[in-house]
Amino acid sequence: MTEATRRYDIDWLRVFAMLGIFLLHAMHLFDEGTDWHLRNVDQSTLVLVFRGLIDMWAVPLFFVLSGFGASFALRKRSGGRFLAERVRRLLLPLYTIGVFLIVLPQIYFDAYTNGFRGGFWEAIGNRFGAFQFTLSWPGLTNLFLGHLWFLQFLFLVSVIVLPLLLLLRSEAGQRFIERVAGWCNARGGIFLLIIPLAVVRIALMGFILGQHTWAYFVFYIVLFLIGYMFAVDDRFTDAIKRNGWVALVLGIVGFAVQGLLVMILNYRMFREPFSVTFVIYEVVLCIGIWGLIVFLMSLAAKHWNKPSRTLAYANEAVLPFFLFHQTVILSIGWFVIPCDLHLIWKLIIVTAAAFAVTLGLYEVLVRRFNIVRFFFGMRPRRTGE
């Protein structure tokens, strides 16, 4: 994106979504009823609710924003150059410092939580020794990636949808986008996009349960394509601006209703695929996801579409911050959760310390050194920056 066309609100949303992911993972140590790599003995239902609210929009929003960015990238790059950039930005950090450095402590924490009491390198060896290729999920291997599954998913999404993205650049593709933009620009039309999201989830979640599955992969593809189209026609943004507060209401209602269904049915609807309760759950979940995404995008488009030094710094830091943050949270949590403190104080300490350490690692180890920036998927630093 050139300075003349750059959408600063999209950059702000990317930073905001990263902060959401950070808080989500910090709260994961203390939320009730879910498994994670490391767990506090005492857990909180209230923390679970707040984490669930962030979980509803944060990762889906990232895929919408990634599609938006891909649209701008392909305006000045060929398909080959676009894929080469994806390799540099996503696969290089994932399969160098990511797999062989950053996620190693997570492997140990995960093994310890599941009863392992051997040494650090023994846990690492056990995990790598069990490596195998598989077609059962989009990662194509059972290699432990921790939170870095997102980079692998995003790369695979980019590769698979690239032919379609190039088709959407054609005259026929542009006419299709214009038609969809016209529908979305009608009163309440932006919420028509709930339909493809719900259809994908209803069609696939009944067959493929669990996170990070092919069902979620296709769901993220739809979000990515929606983001791509949003960047092409300004009528999408106009519709988002007009419907922000309605979207907030829909998002809250969707979140509340799906939460009540989980409490009442205890996930029983997933044992009855394509039942009425299953369909209702998936529909209200998609209403909640899309409502919160549209609300956040409306706020950003109205109030955040402006540059600043803080944004320039934060936007460049997003990828290395993402790479570091979960391992830092778990490492600090390892020492904090045994302490005799109230759960809320532990959460505050872990959140504040992990944020400071993660940002410090970026500032001290990454930002200033071009060789390190290369392995973190960043562009070289220019003289004087």
Image (spheres, rainbow, N blue to C red):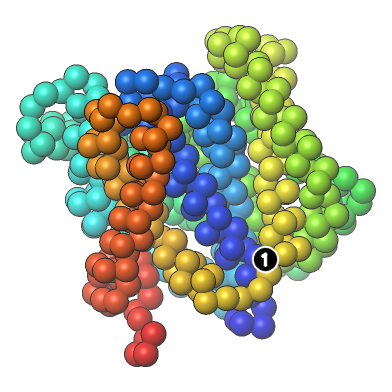
| Residue at image location 85% in from the left, 54% down from the top | 242
Q: Nearer the viewer, residue 131 or 191?
A: 191
Q: Is residue 116 left or right of residue 313?
A: left
Residue highlighted by disc 1: 304
Mark 1 secondary-structure assignment: loop
Residue ranking furthest to the bottom: 384
* The quarter of the displayed image where residue 236 is located: bottom right
Please name the amino acid that badge 1 sits on: Trp
Q: In which quarter of the image is the C terminus?
A: bottom left
Q: Which residue is drawn at 11% across and 24% down?
A: 117
User: Where residue 265 sits: x, y (%)?
Assistant: 61, 9
Q: In this view, does 4 lie to the left or right of 356?
A: right
Vertical side of 321 occupied by 250: above or below: above
Q: Picture coordinates of residue 370 (x, y %)?
A: 28, 77
User: At 37% across and 90% down in the image, what residue appears?
Assistant: 384
Q: Is residue 8 left or right of residue 315?
A: right
- Give the percent coordinates (x, y) of residue 324: 32, 53
Where does residue 156 sit, x and y in percent of width and height?
Answer: 45, 50
Q: Can residue 229 be seen in this view?
A: no
In the displayed structure, 251 sits above or below 94; it is above
- Quadrant of the image for the N terminus? bottom right
- Asked if residue 96 shows in the view, the reply is yes
